Amino acid sequence: MPTHYDTLGVSKSASTDEIKKAYRKLCMQYHPDVASSSSSKSTAQSKNADKFKRISEAYSILGNENKRRRYNFDISESGIQELRKKAAKARGTAGGGGNSFAATLPRNVLIGGILGIAGVTIIRSIMPEKENDDTHHEHTGKKRLVEAWLNPKTKRWEKPRPWDEEYQRLQPVLQFVPRDQVDDGGKR
């Protein structure tokens, strides 16, 4: 199938001025009013009219930069699809679509699964795990530690309470103690 570049007789890298000159030259040659005076047959007139329509359509697209970019993309995509069909035909696969959905699905699922697992692993290594207060660290076997002070009256470890008079008076040194040894005043 001829492209608009073939219709105007210019290369794909032609400038806007070159396209305009080719269009004007072809208009003078194939315009129905100009060409009808030189030919007497009606079939020649209809061929000229069809040719002139193709020339006008080609110029309307190639003369506009935005339309030309879109057209270049379209013809390059169709060229790629044609190559894929030829390659599929050479391989002997059905459908002619090259890499079909059925052939790429397992590969895409595998790649997605691998990337998903890798992503979760990375996120888990960066973010700390949430743990219950009473649980042990699974990877170290150590109990979770909290800051506490030893109350001399009760001989028990307690959470610091800055508002408590006894705590304020003693101003004890806080130490890290396993959570299950700390008395939190009945709150847990």
Image: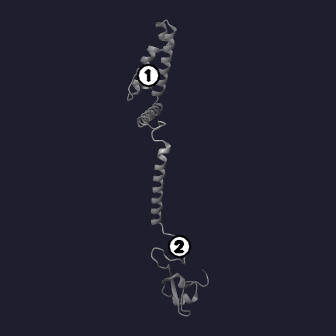
**Secondary structure under the numbered disc 2 in the rendered image:** loop
Position of residue 52 relative to residue 98, above or below, is above
Reading the image, the residue beneath label 1 is 7
Position of residue 149 relative to residue 5, above or below, is below
Please tell me the numbered disc located at residue 120.
Answer: none
**Percent position (x, y) of residue 9?**
40, 22
**Percent position (x, y) of residue 132?**
55, 74
Q: Residues within 10 Å of mark 1 (few under 14, many from 20)?
A: some
Q: How many marks?
A: 2
User: Which residue occupies the extreme right position in the image?
Assistant: 186
Chosen colour scheme: one colour
Q: Please tell me which residue lies in front, 91 or 59.
A: 91
Position of residue 94 relative to residue 175, above or below, is above
**Secondary structure under the numbered disc 1 in the rendered image:** helix
Quadrant where the C terminus lies? bottom right
Q: Residue at x 47, y 45 (%)?
A: 103
Q: Is residue 10 left or right of residue 41?
A: left
**Percent position (x, y) of residue 121?**
46, 63
Q: CA distance from mark 1 to mark 2?
A: 73 Å
User: Which residue occupies the extreme front position in the image?
Assistant: 92
Position of residue 39 relative to residue 63, above or below, is above
Reading the image, the residue beneath label 2 is 131
Amino acid of disc 2: Glu
Quadrant where the N terminus lies? top left
Q: Please tell me which residue lies in front, 153 or 119.
A: 119
Contact, CB < 8 Å: mark 1 with mark 2? no
Amino acid of disc 1: Thr
Mark positioned earlier in the residue sequence (1 or 2)? 1
**Percent position (x, y) of residue 119?**
46, 59
Q: Residue at x 50, y 77 (%)?
A: 136
